[in-house]
């Protein structure tokens, strides 16, 4: 066992664990953050995706010791001041979910994509999202949700700039 210091959704937390434990287990079992899902546990489906320092990663195959001190964002960390992230809002608008099992991975991967590339083409969306599997095959609705998120993200950024100026 070792003490591991993490920064999750803007909060500093310390856990006493085997440092090789997958980050997913720590998030779900120790920190009660159940947005990230256990799908395959092998890095193959994307259901466990979280964002670490702006990059979408698979938490089921990420030893917790490797993300010490990094900014970790889970699905729970997207909402700010009671307001959904534009990507979450777009997901609702597009009714993108079916059973929901994969949707943490879809949303977090899309969030990371739009943070890096706020105006992706359809081809860029397909390429970025291709590793996140959906057994319900909601891929068309997911693509639609990401297209809907593009103007919402732009509007949120513009509103944030206005707040800074005011
Ligand atoms: S549960 Fe992590 S990639 Fe499938
Ligand atoms: S919505 Fe069911 S697995 Fe994707």
Image (spheres, rainbow, N blue to C red):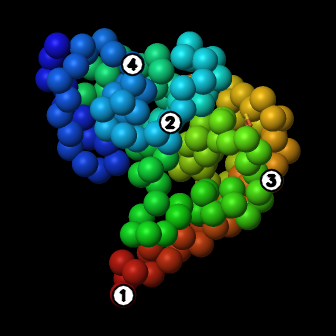
Badge 3, how many Cα within 10 Å: few under 14, some, many 20+?
some
Residue position for label 1: 166
SS at mark 1?
A: loop
In space, the residues marked 1 and 3 are separated at their CA atoms by 34 Å
Where does the image place residue 99, in percent across and percent down from the top left? Answer: 73, 41
Mark in front: 2 vs 1: 2
**The residue at label 3 has a CB less than 8 Å from ligand 2:** no
Q: Is residue 121 found left or right of 140 in the rendered image?
A: left
Residue position for label 4: 22
In space, the residues marked 2 and 1 are separated at their CA atoms by 37 Å
Badge 1, how many Cα within 10 Å: few under 14, some, many 20+?
few
Mark in front: 3 vs 4: 4
Residue at left 75%, top 32%? Answer: 134
Residue 128 placement: quadrant: top right
Numbered badge on residue 153: none
In space, the residues marked 3 and 4 are separated at their CA atoms by 32 Å
SS at mark 4?
A: loop
Numbered badge on residue 144: 3
Q: Earlier in the sequence, mark 3 or mark 2?
A: 2
Residue at left 57%, top 48%? Answer: 111
Q: Are marks 3 and 4 in contact (CB under 8 Å)?
A: no
Where does the image place residue 117, in percent across and percent down from the top left? Answer: 60, 48
Q: Are marks 4 and 1 in contact (CB under 8 Å)?
A: no
Q: Residue furthest left?
A: 3
Q: Residue furthest bottom?
A: 166
Which of these two is toward me, 28 or 127?
A: 28
Q: Earlier in the sequence, mark 4 or mark 1?
A: 4
Image height of 124 relative to 161, above or below: above
Q: Earlier in the sequence, mark 2 or mark 1?
A: 2
Residue position for label 2: 36
Where does the image place residue 38, in percent across and percent down from the top left? Answer: 54, 26
């Amino acid at each position: 066992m070792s003490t591991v210091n993490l920064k999750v959704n803007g909060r500093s937390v310390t856990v006493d664990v085997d440092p090789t434990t997958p980050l997913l287990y720590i998030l779900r079992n120790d920190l009660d953050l159940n947005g990230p899902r256990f799908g395959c546990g092998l890095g193959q489906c994307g259901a466990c995706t979280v964002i670490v320092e702006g990059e979408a990663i698979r938490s089921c195959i990420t030893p917790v010791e490797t993300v010490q001190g990094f900014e970790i964002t889970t699905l729970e960390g997207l909402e700010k001041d009671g307001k959904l992230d534009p990507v979450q809002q777009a997901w609702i608008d597009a009714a993108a979910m079916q059973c929901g099992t994969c949707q943490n991975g879809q949303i977090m991967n899309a969030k990371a994509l739009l943070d890096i590339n706020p105006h992706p083409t359809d081809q860029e969306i397909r390429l970025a999202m291709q590793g996140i599997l959906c057994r319900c095959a909601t891929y068309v609705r997911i693509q639609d949700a990401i297209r809907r998120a593009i103007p919402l993200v732009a509007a949120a950024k513009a509103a944030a700039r206005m707040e800074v100026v005011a």
